[in-house]
Amino acid sequence: MQPSVSIKDLKLDFGNVPVLRNLNLDIGKGEFLVLLGSSGCGKSTLLNCIAGLLEPTDGSIYINGQNVTWAEPSQRGIGMVFQSYALYPQMTVEGNLSFGLANARVPKDEIKRRISHAAEILQIEPLLKRKPSALSGGQRQRVAIGRALVRDVDVFLFDEPLSNLDAKLRADLRVEIKRLHQSLQNTMIYVTHDQVEAMTLADRIAIMKGGVVMQLSSPDEIYNRPVNKYVADFIGSPSMNFIKGSLRHDGEARVKLGQLDFSLNDYSFTRSDFEGEVWFGIRPEHVLFADAASNAPVSFEVKAELVEPMGGLTLIWSSLEGTPFRLLVDGQAKVRVGDTIIAGFDPARASIFDMQEELRI
């Protein structure tokens, strides 16, 4: 199947500074792809290249099989939603939705049909006669999405559309965007630095760093089998625990973490012959506690140094072999600072990386 959006050997330099480096990416028709990374990783720059707002230094961009590398944004068949709502304050919601269509000389009946359809999907029908100043932040963002929606295009681009909203509104609109995608089945490319948005919305996530895609895969694969330590550390809140250790083969694969020495019989290796210094990673939510820890393949005692109640869950900070170590346990667990607790884990749920290149073993 031909991809909806295809990026081939894309490079972009700002002066002597490389921002995107030989980037290749195929996005399937109807796919929801999230570009995820910290500030400055190149995710918004890539989106702007796809939109035609930035000209690449080299490489090509195809949308629905057409080379649009040098085409104007209006000729690319895309709808874009920005971080700032960018609504015309003097116009009503209806005026904002119709403005671009009227300029493109779309017939009035068709404009009315598209606005009615978008307003129904986004549940903004009662707001059509209001001006942006009379709308809440969430309502304004719905209108901004509606302005892209009325263009009736195959590809939608979202540039951190929820980052200006408070936490509850972000969660509510995140659900609306997911429902919108399920309803329309259009290709959507979504930029965010929020991993919760990425994990809940995406069919696939492209994690970027320094203008390069570190890993491109499903949320499940990225969470459970990160390709390197950067991805493992970036995904997950709280982030993964990392402990320095050594990996050896004495008839079986074994890891030594200070005083702890245990088998890796059930671990799924990508490089089964590796021996040497490693980072051993285990997520706080995969660390077992109390009775469950006593029956785990690996168990040990730690002291609770800090306790953070979060309602349904409690985060316990401790130390293992001189390294900060966190446990995410049930919110009803009775733990106080200074308590000695039993913790444990199953090595099969770990992620192990070599010390030099920090790639998954």
Image (spheres, rainbow, N blue to C red):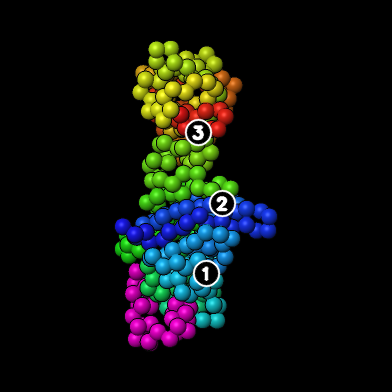
Nearer the camera: disc 3 or disc 1:
1
Q: Are marks 3 and 2 in contact (CB under 8 Å)?
A: no
Mark 2 residue element: strand
Q: Is residue 107 magenta?
A: yes
Mark 2 belongs to which amino acid? Arg
Mark 1 belongs to which amino acid? Trp
- Residue 48 horizontal/vertical position (percent): 54, 63
Residue of label 1: 70
Quarter holding the N terminus? bottom left
Mark 1 residue element: loop
- Residue 226 horizontal/vertical position (percent): 45, 37
Compared with residue 100, is residue 80 higher up or lower down, i.e. above or below?
Answer: above
Q: Please indicate whether residue 352 sits to the left or right of residue 183 in the image.
A: right
Residue of label 3: 359
Residue displayed at 45% across by 67% down: 67
Badge 1, how many Cα within 10 Å: few under 14, some, many 20+?
some
Compared with residue 210, is residue 264 higher up or lower down, i.e. above or below?
Answer: above
Give the spatial CA distance, label 3 vs label 1.
Answer: 37 Å
Residue displayed at 42% across by 39% down: 223
Mark 3 residue element: loop
Give, as a single range, the part of the protein colored magenta. 94-121
- Residue 146 horizontal/vertical position (percent): 42, 71
Badge 2, how many Cα within 10 Å: few under 14, some, many 20+?
some
Q: Earlier in the sequence, mark 3 or mark 2?
A: 2
Compared with residue 31, is residue 333 higher up or lower down, i.e. above or below?
Answer: above
**Marking on residue 170:** none
Query: In this view of the protein, can residue 223 be seen by the observer?
Result: yes
Residue of label 2: 21
Give the spatial CA distance, label 1 vs label 2.
Answer: 19 Å
